[in-house]
Image (tube, rainbow, N blue to C red):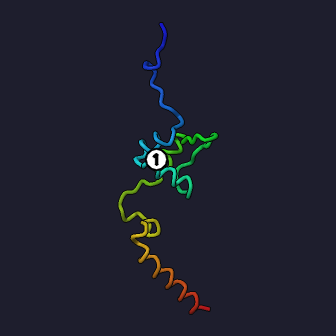
Amino acid sequence: MAIEANDLDITPLYLRTNDAARISGLSPAKLIKLRTVGGGPKFIRQGNTVLYKQTDLVEWLDGFTLESTADIPVEVRGNRYKHLIAPIKQNDKKKARLKS
């Protein structure tokens, strides 16, 4: 009796950008941007083909696990909170000048 491909439960170990985007909930364009600027999951470039190892993608996504939005550091909340970060940095510089 021959085994058919449909009979096997095989999950690919390596995912192309579109598949990685579908699994992560991000758009393919966002994954491409993260590859360019950094901060995304590890990837493999083989010629013109980009692959994501499934375990690396899951590990990267697990790094965003939170119990509350209060767990998000102000520095990574995005442009919306830059006005909160800038005064803190300016005050630190003033304190440094006053100490010296």
Question: Which residue is found at the position 40% from the left and 72% from the top?
Answer: 81
Q: Residues within 10 Å of mark 1 (few under 14, many from 20)?
A: some
Which residue is outermost to the left? 68
Answer with left or right where residue 34 lies relative to residue 82.
right
- Give the SS element for disc 1: helix
Residue 46, placed above or below residue 63: above
Q: Position of residue 26 (x, y in %)?
A: 42, 49
Q: Position of residue 94 (x, y in %)?
A: 53, 89
Q: Position of residue 69 (x, y in %)?
A: 36, 62
Which residue is outermost to the top? 1
In this figure, which residue is indicated by the disc labeled 1? 28
Question: Which residue is found at the position 54% from the left and 36% from the top?
Answer: 14
Residue 44, placed above or below residue 79: above
Q: Where does the C terminus fall, quadrant-wise?
A: bottom right
Residue 14, placed above or below residue 75: above
Question: Which residue is found at the position 43% from the left and 46% from the top?
Answer: 24
As shown in the figure, which amino acid type bears the numbered disc 1? Pro
Question: Which residue is found at the position 48% from the left and 27% from the top?
Answer: 10
Total marks in image: 1
Q: Quadrant of residue 77?
A: bottom left
Which residue is outermost to the front? 48
Q: Position of residue 50 (x, y in %)?
A: 57, 42
- Between residue 92 and residue 36, name the one nearer to us: 36
